[in-house]
Image: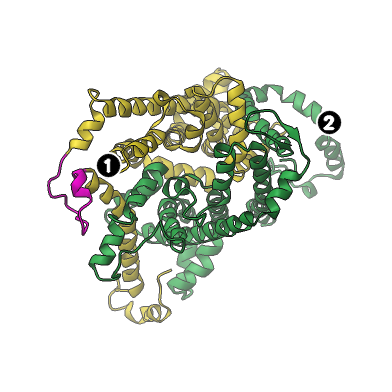
Chain colours: A yellow, B green
Amino acid sequence: MSVQPGQTQAEPRRAPKRRKRPFRTDQLLGWVFLAFLLAYAVIPMLWMLSTSLKTQFGALQQPPRWIPENPTLAQYRLLLSPFNDVGRDFLRYLLNSLWVSTATTVLGVLVAVPAAYAFSRFRFPGRNALFFTVLVRNMFPLVVFLIPLFILMKNLHLVNTHWSLIITYLTFGLPLSIWLLKGFYDNIPPQLEQAARIDGASRFQAFWLIVMPLSSPGIIATAIYAFIQAWNEYVYATTFLTDDRLLTLPVGLQRFFAEYSTNWPGLMAASFIMSVPVVVMFLLLQKYFVRALTEGAVKS
Amino acid sequence: MSTVPLQHEPQPPLPPEQALPEGSARRRAPERQRNILLRIRDHWADYLYIAPALLVMVVVIGYPLVYTVYLSFFETPPRGGRNFNGIDNYTTILTSERFWMVTRNTFNWTIFSTLFAFLLGFGAALVIQREFIGRGIVRGILLIPWVISLVAAAYVWRWLYHSDYGLIGGMLQEWGVTQERFVFLDSTRWVMPSLIVANVWKEFPFVMIMLLAGLQTVPDQLMRAARVDGANSWNQFIHVTVPHLKNVIVITILLLFVANLNSFGLIWIMTGGGPAYASQIWIVEIYTLAFRSLRFGLASAFSVILFLFMLSIGYFYVRAMTSGDRERGHA
């Protein structure tokens, strides 16, 4: 991308002299581009962190300062302490989010694993529909589902319960989860199971003892993806939940904003706390995730 | 859903028909056209594995789709009940001036977000693909915007753009780029570009990770062969990398396009569609109609219009996704 046509023609001439790494302008441009990208990606995050350590007055100082003059953890102490109203609310939202995301993830894996295995191994009529479900799910506007689902949840008396969210997230995550997992199962040779079955294992035993351990990276990647999606989801959460005690973090954050709209350090601290778990989780396990994408989505 | 062509099965490896003796080829044909019910009966146990997934999907995806279409033909007074009013909802929407203004915003938002997110993400993938020290860390850092919550991202950007105390406006003034305080989100002219910058920030890592995954499948031999033949990096990129990645590129662009057409949270939190509807897009309009004005019928009709638009894009999407299979089939 960042190549100038003139530069590269010099390469053959230079190549014999310095074999290892001839200096090339396109590489330099590559580094410049990378530096720009890093700045673009990181500056908002750093500003979030920097603001969260300022006093309310310090945050409004002009011109803006990167390093807070009197850094303070006051906002974090306020948010994470159960002994005041703000902290109690925030911790409750945190627990709500944790519960909804965990339940979604666990149920999602339990439902997706057998389905993905079936799509990978069996040839039944309609198995190609999976692909189109993934498609439909990605294709159709959220609001198409939002209005009738809201009415459905109301009729089932699930509005203002966490189950409305868990069911919704579970379903919307399923097609992609199944698709990603199927990519993993496709790569595990069926001969391994056949060998186990010849040795007397049942189909389920062969699956449990042979296929499950081999596909665990895929399951981990899928589970993380489901967790992050549920943790971050906002639109359904804001529509289905109105009871203050039930809110998840994204919606809770919005409520904070409505109440303390001038307290930017507090808001940034809350955003930071909310981002930490998913970022850490993702950074630790990004290897699996990239692999899942390569094997599941891209190759197949 | 039934409009999606289902006939291209990416096949169980059947032996090539020509290789078979004539008799068996003829016997095979009725076998393949056997009654679908019989085939389903033969495989009934397989469905047990997908039954739980199927059940939730029918309830949570199938039912709402049908119900939205149904509701779009009714007038729904906020106090409850419904009256059939034919296609009135549709004509109301399509003849309003507001609809066309919102449509223009929607296209600006979708096209520019997709374009810039794709270019940046592709560039990032190409740079990150090289081996260098700290590559894993850099990749991780670049992925952070994608991973964090949309709500947190929306508030950070809102704070960065703040008309009185924002970092960006403050820096521009400090460096003497602008004399006056530059107004981002409160200006009808700049609100859309500002939102797009925030949106691209959130999305480019997705493109990067998809294309990075794709780049790993480009065979090294192909690149080496091109280099031996005297191709420079640009030619390598255009004649080897891009054609090899064609499918991934098409899928990524379409996914981005659809995601942008459907995006709601960022605009809703940062501007709510304002000022003066300058950042109102379809989804935000529908949400406002349904959950602020409580006009579910009208909002449903609007959803159906959006849905039909998506369907036509879906057609290209399916063609793009399946063209790879066809090519591979011929090779």
Q: CA distance from mark 1 to mark 2?
A: 67 Å
Main SS, magenta region, reads loop
Q: Which image quarter: residue B97?
A: bottom right
Q: Please, which chain is the residue tagged with disc 2 on? A: B
Packing grade of label 1 (10 A; few <14, some 14-19, many >=20) is some
Whether labels 1 and 2 belong to a single chain: the reply is no
Q: What residue is rendered at 49% in x and 22% in y?
A: A161
Q: Secondary structure at mark 2?
A: loop
Q: Is residue B85 left or right of residue B227?
A: right
List the residue tagged with mark 1: A263
The residue lying toward the viewer, choosing from B3 and A297, is B3
| Residue sitting at x 43%, y 33% | A227
Q: Which residue is mark 2?
A: B35
The residue sitting at 36% across, 43% down in the picture is B152
Whether residues under marks 1 and 2 lie with C-beta atoms below 8 angstroms apart, the answer is no
Which amino acid type is shown beneath numbered disc 1?
Asn
Residue at position x 36%, y 50% from top?
B158
Tell me the number on the disc at residue A280. Answer: none
Whether A102 is drawn above or below A8: the answer is above
Q: Is residue A299 visible?
A: no
Chain letter of disc 1? Answer: A
Q: Position of residue B309 (x, y in %)?
A: 67, 51
Going by the numbered disc 2, the residue's amino acid type is Asn
Q: Quadrant of residue A126?
A: top right
Say whether residue B53 is magenta.
Answer: no
